[in-house]
Each structure stands twice: as C-alpha cells, then as structure tokens.
Image: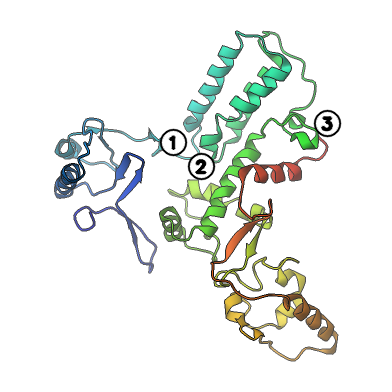
Amino acid sequence: MRGWVKGFDVARENIESLEVTHLQYADDTLIFCGAEEDQLKYLRVILVLFEGVFGLHINWIKSSMYTINEVNNIDLLASILGGEVGTLPTTYLGMPLGAKSKSLEIWNGVTEKCENKLARWKTQYFSRGGRLTLINSVLDALPTYMLSLFSIPPGITKRLDSIRRKFLWQGNKENRGFHLVKWNAVTTGKKNGGLGIKNMELHGKALLMKWLWKYSNENQTLWRRVIGAKYENEDSWMTKIVTTPYGTSLWRSIRTIWEEVKPKFKMKVGNGNKIKFWKDEWHEKGNLETLFPDIYNLAMFQQRAIAELWTPQGWNFNFRREPNNWEVMRLAKFLNMVGHFTGLQAYEDMLWWKGNNRGEFKVHSAYRLLDQSSQQSPI
C-alpha cells in the first residue's frame, strides 16, 4: 500500500520518520490513510484485489470509518468503501480507542461486570471461604485486561475494593458485615500472612512493568519502534521521561514507574553493545559506578558500552591520571572484580529479571516482589 495510501508518520525533529499504514490482529485490520478521495479509491482497489487473489470476503457492511479531526466530506469518503461512519471514542478488541487514558469512564465496563457478578452471587449462599475463592478467581481477574495497559485511577481502585470488601464480609446479607481484619491485611499475599486477594494498585503496576521489560528487549517490534520514534531513547533500555502534555498519557503512566522498578532488573551481557560498563547494573556485585565511585572518577570514557572497553586480550581502561598511593588498593580490588568477566557472546544484551533464575519477566513474580516490599506486618 506504500505510495498509494498514506498512513501516519511517527517522527521527531531530525529523526527519520516511521510510517504506519495498518495494524492487523487475527481477522481484524486497522488501516490508516488520509482523508482524500484518491486514497480511499486506491484502498478500495487494493481490498478488492485482495478478495480476488486470496478468495476471502471482506464484510464491507461491518467495516467502519473513523476520523481523527473534523472531515467535511466524510459521508462521501465512506460511500467509496461502503461502510458506516463511526465516532470516537469507541471500543476495539475490548479496549477503549480514542478515549483519554486517564478518564474514569473507560473503567465503567469493568466496574459494571464486577457489580453484575456480585448481584447474581447475592442470590446464593456461600461460605466465607467460598466468597474468598470467588473473589480470587473471578473478581480479581475481571480488571486484568484493562490493567495490562492502563494505570488504574485511585477512584476506581476504591470502587473495586469496596465491591470485593462488601462481598467478602457481608455476603448476601443486607446488614453490614463485621470486618475481621484490615483491608491491607486481606490484600497481603498468603505467604506473608494475608488472604491473597489482589491489591489492584500493585497488580496494575506489575502488569505495566511487563511493557518496560518488553521495550528493553524487543528492539525490532513495531510498537517498540513507534514508542522510540515518538519519545526518543534515554539510553539503550528506555525512553526519555515524557514531558509533553498532549497525546502522551498512556506511555507516560508506564514510563513513570521505570525508576522505581529498575532496581528489580539487571543487565545480562551478550554482545556488549547496549550495556554501559559503568552506568548499568550488569555485574553480579552491583553497579560499578556506585561500588567504585573513586575509580569511576579516574576513568575516561565513562559512557562507553562494554563492547567498547573489552578486547580479546581483556579490559582496555584509560584513566585520567596515575592513581595515588591510597587509590592503588581500590584499583586492584576493582580490577580483580571485573577480571572474572569471561567475554562477549553472540546474542544481544538483555534486561534480566531478578524475580526468577531464568531472567524472564513474569507478572506473578513481579506482583510478589511488589507485595513483599509494600507490606510490613499484615495484621
């Protein structure tokens, strides 16, 4: 479609633009183009050719056209494709499309589903253990899809907590149930003495952490390239802090937690091209700039990657001056520590999750770590 249909550009000043023309998921396709008759006619030809070549039928009646800004001839453009004209915000694949990510309204579907479940359960008798099981298996799961992309507002957290709290202690009774322990004890993990009901704020944070891990490791995926092109990279692992006010709230809410969760990751050395020798935590003992600030101040080329300092013969360090007598022992300790490095590998450097031995990020292990660090005594 490139050349016939113009998508949208994701670009910053002095940076090569990234054009996005379409997105596909299973049998659903989003196509982006300009509000011009020629482009819509080209698109119609392309889709008709697709039907003829592959023998698949496009349901034109169920297709919809959405505009980002006001388009005066939208009805004419829609008639070219034969679909209807939709309005934003809408819902696509179960997610809000075109809505403000911080809007409370996008969570209405989640709270309504929880309330509907609760209304049906109130007609039945469940023991407290049964109610606890339903909360853990059903009510805690309903918001997960939205939490996997959007930061949950405090007001929605309070609403979901209220729904779960009332059902746990009150059940199907109309009178107020007696609360045996504080809610923060209820939402503490079982290993820490709680009941294991999800803390929605921590659950959402654990889900958003996965995007940070994926961004750091999935260098060639389209979504990663789009985010990188729009916000510019701070280093090899993450974008710069988002400061622009318009159209950025979704990634900004994800990027905000990076500084908090970064210590829960370390870097695994591959080819050494991404990991900064001094700045990144790649050594098993910790960050070398923090461990040896005096040697760091002596070193030249403090921003260099591991691959730029490593040679087949070993490390190639350059220092600003000869070490003083009192620095010699520290330098020897530093060289001994990094001297155990075995060399570069063929694969790319990776962000390594500390929550398990494989280094692969898992939401449940992230939640467990967040729960442990946030809870003191549950009761």
Q: Indicate the position of residue 373 as horizontal and vertical percent values.
A: 75, 45
Q: Is residue 209 above or below residue 344?
A: above
Label whose residue precedes the other's in the sequence (2 or 3): 2
Residue 379 disc label: 3
Q: Residue at x 29, y 52 (%)?
A: 21
Q: Residue at x 71, y 79 (%)?
A: 297
Q: Is residue 161 visible?
A: no
Q: Looking at the image, which is closer to me, 63 or 14? A: 63
Name the amino acid, label 2.
Leu
Q: Is residue 333 visible?
A: yes
Name the amino acid, label 3.
Ile
Q: Quadrant of the C terminus?
A: top right
Residue that numbered label 2 is attached to? 149
- For label 1, the SS is strand
Q: CA distance from mark 2 to mark 3?
A: 32 Å
- For label 3, the SS is loop
Dot 2 surroundings within 10 Å: few (below 14), some, or many (20 or more)?
Answer: many
- Residue 295 occupies quadrant: bottom right
Residue that numbered label 1 is attached to? 95
Q: Residue at the bottom extreme?
A: 322
Q: CA distance from mark 1 to mark 2?
A: 9 Å
| Cβ atoms at labels 1 and 2 below 8 Å apart | yes
Q: As drawn, is 219 to the left or to the right of 354?
A: left
- Residue 95 occupies quadrant: top left
Q: Residue at x 24, y 54 (%)?
A: 6
